[in-house]
Image (tube, rainbow, N blue to C red):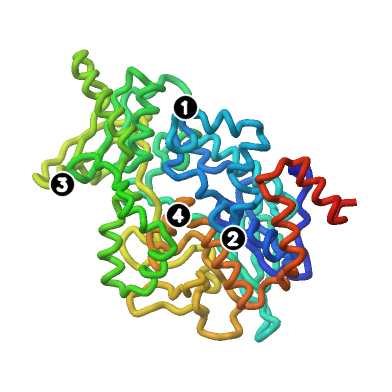
Amino acid sequence: MTDRSDVQATAPTSEPVDVLGVGFGPANLSLAIALQEEQPGTRAFFLEAAAHPVWQGGLLLDGSNMQNHPNRDLVTLRNPRSRYSFLNYLFEQGRLIEHLNLPLEFPLRKEYAQYIDWVTRQFRPQVAFGARATDVAVSGTGGTAQYVVTCADGSEHRARSLVVGTGRTPFVPEPFAGLDSPRVCHLTRYLHTVRELTGEPPRSIAVIGGSQSAVEIVLDLAHRFPHAKIVNYVRKFGLRLKDTSPFSEEGFFPSFTDYYYRADRASKRELDAYMRPTNYSSTDADVLHHLYALMYEQRLDGDQRVFVRGNSAITTAEPAGTGVRLEVEEVHTKEVSTDHADLVILATGFRDLGPGEHQEPYPALLAGVIDRFQVDDDGHLVVEPDYRLRSHSDSTPPLFLNGLCESSHGIGDAGSFSLLSLRAETILNGLREAGGTAPAPDAEAYAWETEVFDLAGSPERQLEAAFDKGSIR
């Protein structure tokens, strides 16, 4: 595959594109691949706020893995023959055999980040990096209506359809919401924060939350700052083991997405409660056992420095010197104690779409057009099965949400790669139905492409086939 990372994007100006994507993380990257492979004539362009995006850059911890089967990548479930698969990435990097010999169940997170970067660079001509979208409006009426997206630098981008794939908003609990301190960060900024610390290393560190990321961060902190006291505050009794039952994992099947979508709101809440431990507030056995053994050994040595404090809720957080003063309430006895932390990491997850506590009713970027779209009796945006927002009028151009619809489509939209490529296909089909794509290639051309890039053959054989077909001259 030719590396086109030196090619600069040429943003559309006056003429609207067919599809404009806001955000170019894995969700919209997967859609870009689907458009290229299945609708190559479609004019698509993407806006990405980060100048140099790195997937999960704040959490590329040494030894951390994906917790996801590698074939659930950007493309494979939709098109197993795609050149953009993780398997082909390994092959092209000369690491396939070595990787298959790894004594690991899942890929290292660092390697998956490199895979995503490898694919991203190949779409550079279709992306404006460092372009932070600040406003969305609709221009025109009827069949001429189009979206106008304005960026922070004042540039405007027009499109006949819009796909918002910005990722969910980090959830910052109320005691920390108004706290402006370089010693407090959300997990998305974890590595950036600890690498930027100056002066003496922290002597006391608080990690808030009971997720997989929380435990991984505690272990990483224990390695970085071996003399610091590290306390993991958890609202529940303790840290839970993740539900990895294959029966529960069927929640990440497309059939479950369809089932969940048809359920009423009460049934959705019941299904959410069952599915939650497969992805939230729970931890894989390997890191959970590592943490427990570490704490046990520290107690054995008479020098415990890592603690898990269950049944604990932070009720107050305020600056205190170079650190933060915390008031901690015992959830059941209501006893209140005071702690101090030189560094606080909020492993508190993200906001889902919805009217409830810890949710947000809609992506903030859509504030200028949100009145065009329907809300159900429970206060949720009405999202169609193909991830298109249901509008009040046919004159509103199609707008799709990519990776933001857990409240309507279930756990498969929870930010994992499990259904990423199939969701891209669903959105692509929705774009086709809405007339937002170019005509599909003819059957003969598509058959040629799948033959040429069949990964069962060598790159040399693929090139030979291309020359034989007369498509490379």
Quarter of the picture holding the N terminus = top right
Looking at the rendered image, the disc whose residue lies closer to the viewer, 4 or 2, is 4
Looking at the rendered image, the disc whose residue lies closer to the viewer, 3 or 2, is 3
Query: To which residue does mark 4 refer?
Result: 169
Left or right of 225? Residue 147 is right
Of residues 13 and 318, the one drawn nearer to the viewer in this rendering: 13
Q: Residue furthest right?
A: 473
Residue drawn at the location 41% of the way across and 69% of the way down: 258
User: Which badge, 1 or 3, comes first in the chain's sequence?
Assistant: 1
Left or right of 102? Residue 397 is right
Give percent across and percent down for residue 54: 58, 41
Give percent across and percent down for residue 169: 45, 54
Local packing at callout 3 (Cα closer than 10 Å; few below 14, some 14-19, many 20+) is some
Alpha-carbon span between mark 4 and mark 2: 15 Å
Amino acid at dot 1: Leu
SS at mark 1 in the image? loop
Amino acid at dot 2: Thr
Q: Can you see residue 360? A: no
SS at mark 2 in the image? strand
- Disc 2 + disc 1, Cβ < 8 Å: no
SS at mark 4 in the image? loop
Local packing at callout 4 (Cα closer than 10 Å; few below 14, some 14-19, many 20+) is some
Alpha-carbon span between mark 4 and mark 3: 27 Å
Q: Can you see residue 248? A: yes
User: Which badge, 4 or 1, comes first in the chain's sequence?
Assistant: 4
Alpha-carbon span between mark 1 and mark 3: 32 Å
